[in-house]
Amino acid sequence: MNPTSAPSKDTYDVVVVGTGAAGLSASLTAARRGLSTLLVEKAPQWGGSTSKSAGMVWVPGNNVFRSVGGHDSIELGRQYMKATVGDTTSDEMIDAFLTEGTKCMDFLTASCSGLNFRHMQGYPDYWLDAPGAAKQGRGVEAGNYDSRRLGEWEKTHIPAYFRPVIHMDMNSFDSPYMILMMSDLRPWVRIMKLGLRNIPQWLRGEKTLTMGAALTGSIMEAVLKAGVEVKLETPLEDLVFTGDRCTGVIVSQRGEKIQVNATHGVILGCGGFERNAEMRQKYQRHPINGTWTLGVETNTGDGIEIGVKHGAAIDNMADAIWSPVIQLPIVRKGFNPVVIDDEERYIVPDRSLPHTMIVNGEGKRFMNEALPYCTAGQRLYGGHFGKGEGDAENLPAWLIFDSQFRKKYIFAYGYLPFMSLPDEWYESGAVKKADTLEELAAMIDVPVDKLRETTETFNRYARNGVDEDFHRGEDEHDFFYGDRYHKPNPSLGPIEKGPFYATAVYPGDIGTSGGLVIDTKARVTRPDGSVIEGLYAAGNTTKSVVGHTYTAGGTSIGAALVFGHIAANHIADQLPHEMVAH
């Protein structure tokens, strides 16, 4: 199969747009139900933002979670979602996600021979005071996957956002220990076990993937085996309608437009609009742009805009899966244990470990820096869920740390304590360094007296082990990313030994969470609630099932997989019994 040639036919039962979690789940489901399926992707690589992600999957009460040692129920998940999501999502949508979710997870594990989920024990839900919250977590992640199984499709697979310098089975629990490996001997027990775990795979010459790349790789393998025709560099240009029903798509290849008919349905799973600066300026609080995001470059809202053009309703457009980031120029020299191809860097560990804090332009702290990423991103904007009049209330913001942090912890997922930070970072202004806090305050243009006062207060809290203002380090989430060996608080340490450092913090994101409004069958709807027949959507192309918030790591991937599955099943269920597999 040539991935960039024209589709082999002009008519299929189903056309799916996008190769992230939503598109892969939808196309696999459609093909396994016996429907001829075309899967098209705008980019020259496949996997979408799901491939770049940590690959967590959050679907409460599913059987897969129980099979790997978890304890959960749909009812607990329902309690938790209804307490956290509020009235932004109907009870019917929540129930559809939960009840169909366990079926989707069963289907994926039965259909994908290379997919092995494992328990995310210890990684908690994000709203721990809510009824039904799982303090030890209810998510799963894809286990190690040998990318050689993909054959010629291996070379066009989007790589993970961060990945070990050598192929390695490293799960989400290994990384917190690796970040602590220069501060204590105890993490080395875990690291030694990590090495031993990988020896058999190295001896076999496997090209091991984990996290999001393992998830998309294993599902794509099943998609190809199921007979789905996959085309890359084939962007969606428009939808085709016969009367009020969507009956196909217009795609393009090398400037030529091609009409492809979809006899039974079109499923849009082509991501959000995080890379579309114009849409972000229109719908979201300022400052905002299309560069602070970790989403793939091709997520420019095409499916959303084309849907609106044909009468679709949209909602939740002001929201995203926020995650504070810093921007560091890419420097390829010296040894880095982790490879990162983006200037935007997650700072979940950096803002959770001792000897760091975040201040705004007034030199004041304004949140528990170790908050779950979406909530922390919303705090940068201020207001309720980041909403409010005018521009962001806490920007500019700065991550402040001292030499103690640099001597003990890996910085920005890649720079070991004994490594000097690249000169290019200082020369570009991405990182500021000063011998005293007073000098640092002048460099970042915050009031010297206020920064000194904030630091003195923070240091007092750190020594006592209690953050009296924002309660940093007091719950299971803060513990997971903090220094579990540091006393008296795993997330607090005084900032008092020069040199001192600062780097600007931006309201980055993993993707947007507003888009087309769908119903419980994943059918796209109009503003009056009526259904656009033949048109379905899932994933970040749609309004998020969790509304303004984010319930846990893996929520968006879980919803994408589930509603992609729902969409394809609904198409198949409308056909005569003898036409489809069951």
Image: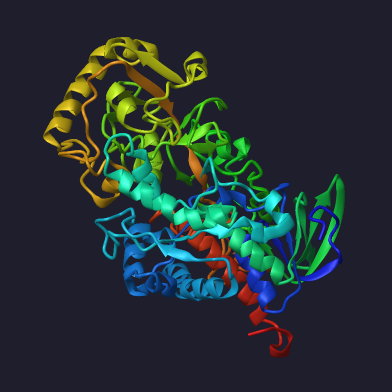
The quarter in which the C terminus is drawn is: bottom right
Q: Residue at x 60, y 35 (%)?
A: 277
Residue 136 placement: quadrant: bottom left
Give the percent coordinates (x, y) of residue 542.
57, 57
The quarter in which the N terminus is drawn is: bottom right
* Image position of 222 with respect to 578: above or below: above
Q: Residue at x 60, y 66 (%)?
A: 25
Task: Report whether 81 appears left or right of 425.
Answer: left
Could you say which is closer to the camera, residue 65 or residue 194?
A: 194
Give the percent coordinates (x, y) of residue 357.
29, 29
Q: How is the image coloured?
A: rainbow
* Image position of 19 with respect to 406: above or below: below
* Image position of 356 with respect to 184: above or below: above
Residue 11 placement: quadrant: bottom right
Q: In this figure, what is the number of numbered marks?
A: 0
- Residue 440 appears in the figure: yes
- Residue 537 appears in the figure: no
Residue 485 placement: quadrant: top left
* Image position of 542 with respect to 389: above or below: below
Q: Residue at x 33, y 57 (%)?
A: 125
Task: Report whether 322 appears left or right of 111.
Answer: left
The extreme left residue here reads 464
Could you say which is closer to the camera, residue 32 or residue 518?
A: 32
Give the percent coordinates (x, y) of residue 388.
40, 38
The extreme bottom residue here reads 578
Q: Residue at x 39, y 68 (%)?
A: 60
Could you say which is closer to the camera, residue 259 or residue 346?
A: 346
Could you say which is closer to the camera, residue 521 or residue 340?
A: 340
Task: Report whether 299 appears left or right of 344.
Answer: right
